[in-house]
Amino acid sequence: MSPHPLQKTMSRARSSRIVLPPVQEHIMKIDDVIDDGDYYGAQQMYKSVSSRYVAAEKYSEALEILLSGACSQLKHEQVTCGAELAVLFVETLVKGKVPCDDNTLDRVRKIYKNFPQIPLPQQLGEDDDVQQLSEALGAAKTRVEGCSSFLKAALKWSMEFGSHRSGSPEIHIMLATYVYSESPEVDMTRVSYHFVRGNNPEMFASILVNFVGKCYPGEDDMAIARAVLMYLSLGNLRDANRLIDELKKHEERDELEFPDSELIEFIIYLLLTLQRDALPLFNMLRANYKPSIEREPALNEFLDEIAEKFYGVRRRNPLQGIFGDFLKMMG
């Protein structure tokens, strides 16, 4: 049985009359606990104190405590604790119906910047080194999972309370960058998924240059082609071209040798074709470069979406693209 509207009003009135100490008093007290190295004790204090402010509907105070807590724990490399408080911070944004604006994004960015970035050991030697590498890989996985859980929650909040249907471009960039820099084994499909929903093709180009310089043969042209097709499947011809232009600048400036393959040739021709109303040429390109395109099944799915976006060609299964996006987001 739902409460009577009058009961709700009285409950809100009682909440607003609750007198709580200034936030800074709590933060200073918990900082002392952190300085003593009692991270678990500090974690319980952050959670219990912030929950009291949430119960009183004093969301800005709760957010201040959770922001301080997440940053403090992460600065001390307590990633699991810090990530938990970071997610609670986002959950409080949702409860308080806080809009996704520049001020709040700055606070999300502040937490993000405190997630540790630790290079993995490059050399293997004695058994101790193997154990050290194993521990480093486990720690890296924990960092990526913690940061990802925070930023995925932040993306959902930004979809609901921001102006971008697919979430804040800035948060997509943060997630893509952290996953790329900290993952022991980089999933470039996941990285690209978030970069193309971001707002920085120049940074994406730099990441691709770095990846191409160290990936296995055959992955280089696929990574570039996939990135371009992802942009185009969203109808974003401008940033697809900007990405290729930036890659060419890197090639000239840094004297890099980029992959020279039929797949890259196809991408260049495709970008030129999409600037015109040329569906027959588009179909001819797909037919001529079919063997290269079929190296990865997802490329044909992207091309189906591109045909729909640019030429109005209806997909055989209209839910296919949506379902594919959903799976990528959940991955």
Image (cartoon, rainbow, N blue to C red):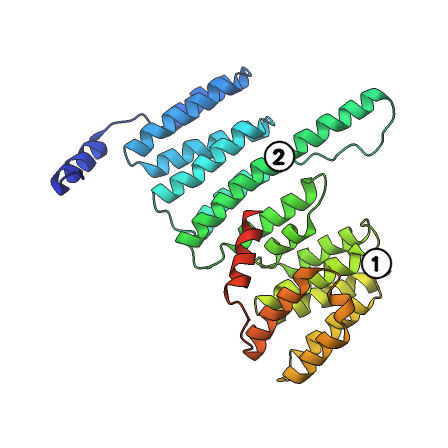
- Closest to the observer, 154 or 49: 154
- What type is the residue that disc 2 sits on? Arg
Few, some or many residues within 10 Å of mark 2 (<14, 14–19, 20+) = many
Which residue is identified by label 1?
A: 254
Q: Is residue 320 above or below residue 55?
A: below
**Left or right of 63 on screen, residue 176:** right
Residue 114 at least partly seen:
no
In front: 47, or 27? 47
First in sequence: mark 2 or mark 1?
2
Q: Position of residue 65 (x, y in %)?
A: 42, 31
Identify the mark at residue 268; answer none if there is no mark: none
Q: Quadrant of the N terminus?
A: top left
Decide which of 153, 73 is in the foreground and name it.
153
Disc 2 versus disc 1: nearer the observer: 2
Across and down, in percent, residue 220 comes to: 79, 57
Amino acid type, mark 1: Asp
Residue at image position (51%, 60%) is 322
The kind of secondary structure element at disc 1 is loop
Residue linked to disc 2:
143
Residue 68 sits above or below residue 223 on the image = above
Q: Residue at x 62, y 68 (%)?
A: 232
